[in-house]
Each structure stands twice: as C-alpha cells, then as structure tokens.
Image (cartoon, rainbow, N blue to C red):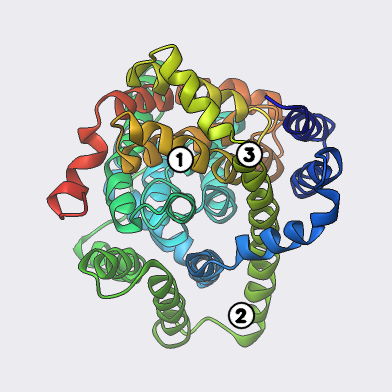
Amino acid sequence: MDQPLLVVIGLLLFLMLLGSPVIFAIGFAGLAYFFVKPGMSAMLDVYAHKFFTGMDVFIWLSIPLFVIAGEIMSAIGMTERLVNLSRLMVGRLRGGLAYVNVVGSMLFSGVSGSALADISALGPVEMEMMEKDGYDKDFAAALTVSSAIQGPIIPPSIPLIMFSALTNTSVAALFLAGAVPGMMLGLGQMAMIFFLARRRGFKANPIAGLNLEMALHILYNAFFAILMPLIIIGGIISGVFTATEAASIAVVYALLVGFLAYRNLTLKALWSILDRSARTSASVYLIVGFATIISWVLANERLPNQLQDLVLHYNLQPWLLLLCLNLFFLINGLWIGDSVQLLLFAPLFTPILAAMGVDPVHFGVIMVLNVMIGLMTPPYGLALYLGASISGVPLGRIVVASLPFLFTNLVVLLLVTYIPEISLTLPRLFGFI
C-alpha cells in the first residue's frame, strides 16, 4: 500500500476517532490525497468534478423523495393507526405491547425505509405505552431501537437503493431479497420476547371493548399505510416504474392521503416536512459526494486489485471471506455510520465477491444487515443515541437491555449469510436473477 493511500486512510481514521463530523472527515481525507500524491496538486479540479458527479446520479433522487413520503405519512397520524393495527394483531398475547413494538416497526418500514425515522415516529408512542403498562423504560427503549433496524431491510429501503446505485445491482431484486431477512429480524426479536415474557411476567394488552365493528374501523384506518408499499413494490417489480419514479409516486400518494383521505395535512405542516427532509437529504448528498472522492482515490491507487490479489494469494474460500467481512462491517459499525460504510465499501468488495461466485444481490442484503446492526452498537450507534434522547434513559442501560436482541439479530445475520436461498428465492421467482 503506497504512502498517499496510507495518509488518506490514516487521516480519515484519526478524524473519525477524534469525533469530527463524518462529512468533514471524509472531505478532508480525500482532499489530503491531492497534496501528498506527487503531481496531483495541479489536478484539484478532479476533486470538485468527482464531488458533483458523485451526487449527479438519477437514482439518488429517490432518497429525498422517500424521506418526504415517510415524513408526510408520519405527520398525518399514520403512527397511531399502525400501532392500533399491531395491537389488534398481537396485543392479546402475553407481552402484548412488546410484540406491538416489533410488528409496528415491521409495518412502518413499508412507509419510511429508514431505521432512524422509525424510532423518531414510533418511539415516543411505543415507549410511553410500554412504560404505562409496567415495562422498564430501558427495556422499552432497547426494544424500540432493535425493532427499528428492520425498516431499512424490508422494502422500500433507502440503504438498498444506495447499494443498488453504487454497484449497478437491480433495485427490484434487492427489494425482493430484503423482504424475508427483514421479517426474520422481527420474528427473531418476537421469539426473544416470547422467552422474556415468561421469565419477567409480561402481561397481555388487548384492546378494551374490541368488537367486529371496532376491528374493521382499525383496519380501515391503517389501510392507506399498508397500500403504499404494495403500490411501490408492485410497480417496481412489474416494471411499470423505476425506483425514483416510485419514490415520486409515494410522495403524491402521501399528499393525496393527507389532503383528501384524512384531511389533516396543512400547508404549514407540509412546509415543516419539506424543511426537515431537505436538511436530512442535504447531509446524505454531501456524504455521497465526498465518499465518491474517497472511492476514486481507492480505485486510483488500485486498492480493489490489490485486495483481489490478496484473496487469490491466500486462496480464501467465499464462506471465510464472508465471515471476515461480517466481522469487518460489525467492527466498523462501532465508529462509522451506515451510509458511510455503504459508500466506501460496497463498490470495493462487491466485484471481489462476484468474481468468487457470490451473487451481488445476496451480498447487498448481507452488507445492509451488517450496517443496520451497527446502528445499535456503541459507541457510535446512532439508533442508540436517538433512543436515549427520546426515552431519557442513559445510553449504557439501553445497551445492556438491547443485548438479547443484538444476539437474535446476529443469528439472523449468520443464517442470511450462509443460506443464500433466504435472500435469493424471491428475486429468482420473479425473474430478476
């Protein structure tokens, strides 16, 4: 590995460990390359060019659009409607509200596609309900954080869209491939709740006075939230529209539901939604632009070729390389965010694994699972910090309470890694691979 590349990687690690904002750490590390690499200082225009062309990709437009759609659906009261539907489905079981937390996140994932959005929207409602029902606050916060990582696995998924753009993999195939693993995460967490409910004496939480009329009313209220992901996924799979067009349709659909069906969306609320969405999207776009520079630096220094030569030299088998990459991503998740890992490493490792016979769709699901689990691992886990902020529970207590669910998530990760059919069966059935 040449000295300029070592300087870039070293500076990036140093700035990240120092607590510098991710955007600045990546930007300065990429800029440093042009001053330490002989002859590159006269080519600073490449830095600007790569920064803007990295953001100038059509599919990236889907990210702010899906963010807007999720914000609108949350603002018009979809959260409470989905929680009520979840109570109708599983509230009567022992540990009812714990199950409601998981099922609610599973349903809301079809609206937002983001783990942090799930926590922000569902967290206050679910944590308050669980606390009133006698659950410990740290357990409620830990379960909310853990259940939210289903969101970016179950389609529509913003991280899977990012992986698709970075590796030229079919977004429809990735969406289908993520459906079963995402549901497995939820089922694993529900299995842990089943065990804990009997040890800790959790009680059921059925809806009081439930009858057929009330059940139909709950189903009707949640109908528009359930219909939205069906339209998006159905349109993409059938080839009627692309992922970016699907995101646009999701926004239009959310606006129609808010203005015409529920009639509780105001222009003032819409302005606030657009403001929040613009801020969120701007940070993502800046990271995308600067990470594109880092990816170009790695390619210019032939790091992918060197890694491939290393794999061939040691004759690593695919199962062993996948295990090493799982550990690599999980360790990186302790201090690097999910989008940064995708932007830096997806283009780097996907060609290597594809050459070894690992399907890029399968690897995409594995990688997204890894970086989502990283959201609930300290010290950098953003989902943990958000859960602590909403609940008021110290971060350390949430980490301890989340360990059983971290275990179930890791079991699902291993199953998905070494049983490719879990991810690839649906894409094959629909003819995408």
Asked where in the image residue 401 lies, by quadrant, the reply is: top right
The answer to which of marks 1 and 3 sits earlier in the sequence is 3
The answer to whether residue 254 is above or below residue 363 is below
Mark-to-mark CA distance, 1 and 2: 31 Å
Q: Which residue is label 1 attached to? A: 368
- 202 vs 4, left or right, is left
x then y, percent, for residue 324: 47, 18
The answer to whether residue 294 is above or below residue 319 is below
Q: Amino acid at mark 3?
A: Leu
User: Is residue 256 at least partly visible in the picture?
Assistant: yes
Compare residues 367 and 256 and report the one nearer the observer: 367
User: Is residue 134 at least partly visible in the picture?
Assistant: no
The answer to which of marks 3 and 2 sits earlier in the sequence is 2
Q: Amino acid at mark 2?
A: Leu
Asked where in the image residue 379 lies, by quadrant, the reply is: top right
Which secondary structure, mark 1?
Answer: helix
Between marks 3 and 2 in the image, the one whose residue lies nearer the viewer: 3
Q: Which residue is label 2 attached to? A: 270
Asked where in the image residue 95 lies, by quadrant, the reply is: top left
x then y, percent, for residue 363: 37, 36
The reply to whether discs 3 and 2 touch (Cβ–Cβ < 8 Å) is no
Q: Amino acid at mark 1?
A: Val
Between marks 1 and 2 in the image, the one whose residue lies nearer the viewer: 1
Between marks 1 and 3 in the image, the one whose residue lies nearer the viewer: 3
x then y, percent, for residue 152: 45, 48
- 363 vs 51, left or right, is left
Q: Which residue is label 3 attached to? A: 298
- 297 vs 179, left or right, is right
Residue farthest to the front, as pictured: 39
x then y, percent, for residue 151: 44, 48
The reply to whether discs 1 and 3 touch (Cβ–Cβ < 8 Å) is no
Which secondary structure, mark 3?
Answer: helix
